[in-house]
Every structure is written in C-alpha cells, then in structure tokens.
Image: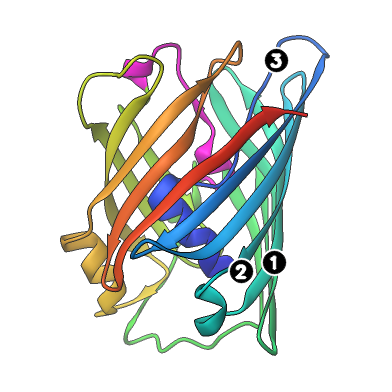
Amino acid sequence: MKHLAAAFALAALALIAPATTAGAETRAFRADYSVTLLGLPVASARFDSSFEGDRFRIRGSVSSSGVGRLFDDTKGTTSVEGTIRQGTVLPSAFDADYVSGRKKGRTAIRFAGDAVETVVNEPDKKRNPKSWVAVSEGHLKAVLDPLSSAIVPAARPEEVCTRTIRFFDGELRADLKLSPAGSPNGRTVTCNASFVPVAGYRKGRKQIDYLKNRGRIAVTFAPLDGTGLYTPVDASVSTQAGPLRIVATRIEPR
C-alpha cells in the first residue's frame, strides 16, 4: 500500500480532492482516480474528505485493478488529518495499512508542529548502513505525507507551480520541485516536477536513479471552487516500466 501511495505522490503529488472553508461550515468531497501503466489499468483509488473550519480529514482506499492484480494484488486504506492555517498545510497524523498477497504492513506518522515526531513501519526492515541513505532529524522538518502533499493553497493558478513539495512516506524522503509547463489553460494549470531524492533509499537503486535523472513528471491541477486550493486531476510520470498515468474520473461534493 505504501508503495502504491508513493507512486501516486510521485506522479500526482497525492490522491485526494481537498477543500477548506472559513468559519465552521462542514464540507465534504469524494474523488475517484484511475491508474494506468502503458495504457493498461493497474490500480484505482477513492478518497473521501471532510473539512470544518481550518481542520481537514481524508479517508481513502487504494487497490490493484486490471492487469495490476497479476503482478501485485494489493489492497489498503490510508488516512490523514490536520489543519490548514495561513496557507500552510499542517498534518497531524497519517496512517496506511495494506495487504499485498500474504504480506501485511502499516505505516504511522505523527507530526508535532511542522515536523515529524514519530514514525512506525511494520514490518520494520533492516537496512545496510553502508548503502542506505539514512533520514536525519533535519530531513523531517516542514514535510508532508503522501495525502496532504496534494493540498496546494494558491490565490491564482500562476502560484501553483512555484513551490517545492517536501515529501515523506514513512521511509522515502524526497523533494518534488514544481515549475510551470506553460501558461494556465482556463481553470487548470500544468506543472513539470523534478524528483530529487533526499534520504530513505538505497544508494544505486535503479528506480530512484531513473526518476532523478531521466524521469519526466507532469501534473495538471484544477481549483476547487471557493476554497483557495488546487488539486491534481491528471498526472503522468515516465518509469522504467513505461508511462504511468493517474486521472481523476470523478471529483464532486458529497
């Protein structure tokens, strides 16, 4: 599950349709996403979000689908809650549980202010310190989990692509540097994203090196009316296995 969420985050910076409001009115949204590899369906996701005042909560499910089940039959749930204050997203708790074949796992990240306080990964894998790029305390300041990293506060579409997403999924710590792919097209804006691994990975890992040196990532964002937030609606990333694409098939109030 964690790796499915990470794939979504690398391609679309997350898998949600967030919203927020002033005052105490509660708003809720549902978003469905499809994932294809080489044009073939490999996964799907659904996310329900609710927002009251400056607080948000997102619950989601991700599962393999189509030909993806032949190679990695994975199902999982994920959630996050936190606040959005003065244009800053502050998650407080992120959880992910998954079942992949006979394997089970979970990740729990707890935040204090704008930094990670604790991380639990089960099972806890042993790493070779000679080849592993360890995550330090400094790496875990002002980071976002795979879900909250998709919440993009912006007053205008031109502001969406002028930022760096500091991403952490419980293991991998990476930066996603956004840049404009062109002028906004009506209500949407497309960003290019450069993947910069920081820590939490094995040196020489081909997937990481490919994304860093050759990977091409593009994300199209659309505004959620009256919220001051943008959310991914279409994203693509080149991988060693071929082009991966994530598309929002539905985003609507519920």
Q: Amino acid at mark 1?
A: Gly
Q: Position of residue 28 (x, y in %)?
A: 76, 28
Residue 113 higher or lower than 11, as above or below: above
**What's the residue at 62%, 82% (across, down)?**
124
Q: Quadrant of residue 90?
A: top right
Quarter of the image where the N terminus is located? bottom right
On residue 122, the disc is none
User: Is residue 145 or residue 119 the one in the foreground?
Assistant: 145
Q: CA distance from mark 1 to mark 2?
A: 5 Å
**What's the residue at 33%, 65% (across, down)?**
38
Labels 1 & 2 near each other (Cβ < 8 A): yes
**What's the residue at 42%, 30% (across, down)?**
221
- The residue wearing badge 3 is 21
Indicate which disc, 1 or 2, sits on the residue closer to the N terminus. Answer: 2
Q: From the viewer's perspective, tell me whether residue 160 is left or right of residue 88.
A: left
Q: Amino acid at mark 2?
A: Met
Secondary structure of the residue carrying numbered label 1: strand
Labels 3 & 1 near each other (Cβ < 8 A): no
Label 1: few (<14), some or many (≥20) within 10 Å?
Answer: many
Q: Amino acid at mark 3?
A: Thr
Indicate which disc, 3 or 2, sits on the residue closer to the N terminus. Answer: 2
On residue 76, the disc is 1
Q: Position of residue 166 (x, y in %)?
A: 42, 46
Quarter of the image where the C terminus is located? top right
Q: Position of residue 220 (x, y in %)?
A: 37, 34
Q: Position of residue 33 (x, y in %)?
A: 56, 48
State the extent of the magenta-drawn residues as a range.
144-159
Label 3: few (<14), some or many (≥20) within 10 Å?
Answer: some
- The residue wearing badge 2 is 1
